[in-house]
Image (tube, grey):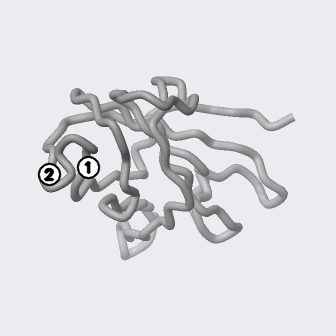
Amino acid sequence: MIRRITKFFSLMTLVFFAISSASFAQNIINSVGTYKIVVNGFDWGPAVDRVIVTLDTKISEIDSKSISVVETKKWYTSNPSENFNRVITNSYLSDSKGNKVKEASNSFVLELKVSPSEGSSFFI
């Protein structure tokens, strides 16, 4: 059984460059939001494979090409932290629990590529 954990994850930072809306396709929408991560189990261990973002503005579409996800890992060495760009494999509008919806919503999901070397919820 895959154990699903959603929680705020202090080691991961989302950087939103722009979020487009169908009715404002030429404009950038500035919005404030929160996110939850979804950690699932894989052969090599747990990894963050999805992020559920909730905004204070409804959007009618999501363009993952305009969003960047940066994971920050904190080390216990001379280099205190390092940033890693995550690869977004899919994005879609959702409800607050991450279920796909077809109408405008305040929430969306970003699915992320995972491997033994990217997305681990453990420190490497």
Residue indicated by mark 2: 28
Tell me: 3 left or right of 34. right
| Quarter of the image where the C terminus is located | bottom right
> What residue is shown with label 1?
19
Check disc 1: other Cα within 10 Å, few if <14, some if 14-19, many if 20+: many
Residue located 43% across and 70% down the image: 84
Instruction: Tell me which amino acid carries mark 2.
Output: Ile
Nearer-N-terminus badge (2/1): 1
Give how far across and how far down residue 88 sits, in percent: 50, 61
Disc number placed over residue 110 in the picture, else none? none
Where residue 29 sits in the image (x, y, percent)?
A: 15, 44
18 and 104: which is toward the camera? 104
Q: Secondary structure at mark 1?
A: loop
Q: Looking at the picture, how far across and down is residue 26, in whole percent?
A: 15, 56
On screen, residue 120 versus residue 108, left or right, reads right
Figure quadrant of residue 67: bottom left
**Residue name at image x 69 percent, y 33 percent:** 4
In the visual, does 106 lie left or right of 101? left
Query: The disc labelled 1 sits on which kind of residue?
Result: Ile
- What residue is at 54 percent from the left and 55 percent from the top? 90
How many other residues sit within 10 Å of disc 2, few (<14), some (14-19) or many (≥20)?
few
Residue furthest out toward the top? 96
